[in-house]
Amino acid sequence: MQSQPEPATTSGPADKPIAHVEFKAMVLLALMLTLVCGFILYVMVARGVFENTQRLVLIADDSEGIIVGMDLTFSGFPVGRVQRIELAEDGKVHILVDIPNKDVRWLRSSSVFTMERGVVGDTRLRAYTGVMSDPPLPPGAQRTVLRGDATAEFPQLVATARDLLANLSNMTAADSSLNASLGNLRTTTERLNGRYGVLGGVLGGDDNARKIITTLDRTNALLAKADERVFGKQGVMDETQAAIRQLNAILSDTRASLQRVDAILADAQVISADTKAVSANAKLATTDLGALRKEVDTSLRRVTQLVDEINRKWPFARDTEIKLP
């Protein structure tokens, strides 16, 4: 058995060692390290590590949903970043926020800070400034965060909805006050649409309205009759005016009689020095005074009769006093 010859080994370029392998590896490592450091530096610059900031401390009841690195927004733009969360001695949570100096101008001493928790989504820290002319926010300021937790309102909303449904059920029940009011309103509307309109609705029915209208008609008839008897032709006013004219005539006669009495008395005083003349004049005066007295008595009786007639016809004044001049 013949043995086959072994193949000859040949050496090629792959068997040659690579020159400067260690140097090239070190350059590659340095390049990688430079890239990593540059990336880290870029991230730090982007995150504002080297930027001048102002510290703001937000005080909350709990830190649920708050994480380090989340933004504090103003009008939708980030103006600060949470750097640390601490638990204070009083059990409150202190949220330390760094605000770049270029964005501090948006925050004032009257600014309001809220922590909003929605049903869906993350927790958000927001700042609101109402008056931009207020003093700027001082460094290291501490502000209480107002909570706007939507999920915390669910029990109250459910209880309010339950009360609302119960009240609605009570309002729509058959014996509810609302149904009774609607029934009364319907009855009132029907009365207003009745024959006597608003009068029937106000008085409670057409029967009461009919009674009122009948009473008014009777009152108008009585007033018309009274007006005719008082102010009509040959009424009380006409008779009263005639009686007043007669009274004026009688008073004129009485005044003339009294004037004659005054003249007689004056004559008696003038002739008092002469006894005979006085006696004659006194006798004559006595005679004249008797006649005048009769005339005065007659006039007074006529006045009295006329006053009685006026009192009988005139329905208002009953006590009449006549003063003679």
Image (cartoon, grey):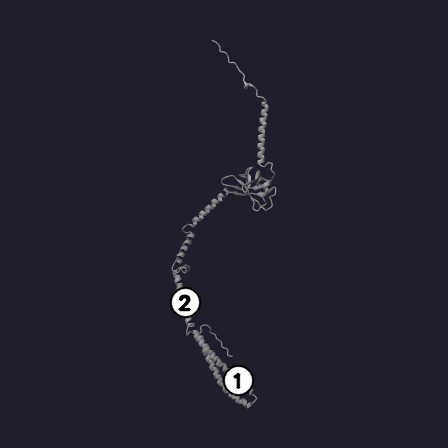
Residue on which disc 2 sits: 220
Q: Residue at x 51, y 82 (%)?
A: 259
Q: Determine which quarter of the picture holds residue 203.
A: bottom left
Left or right placement of residue 236 versus residue 116 in this view: left
Q: Nearer the viewer, residue 204 or 46?
A: 46
Q: Determine which quarter of the picture holds residue 305.
A: bottom left
SS of the residue under disc 2: helix
The kind of residue tagged 2 is: Asn
Q: Any mark on residue 263, and which?
A: 1
Instruction: Residue 300: give x, y in percent of width and height.
Output: 47, 80
Instruction: Residue 273: give x, y in percent of width and height.
Output: 57, 88
SS of the residue under disc 1: helix
Q: Nearer the viewer, residue 1 or 270?
A: 1
| Mark 2 Cα shell of 10 Å, populated few (<14), some (14-19), many (≥20) | few
Name which of mark 1 and mark 2 comes first in the sequence. 2
Q: Nearer the viewer, residue 227 or 269?
A: 227
The kind of residue tagged 1 is: Ala
The answer to whether residue 56 of the structure is visible from this angle is no
279 relative to 302, above or below: below
The answer to whether residue 164 of the structure is visible from this angle is yes
317 relative to 289, above or below: above
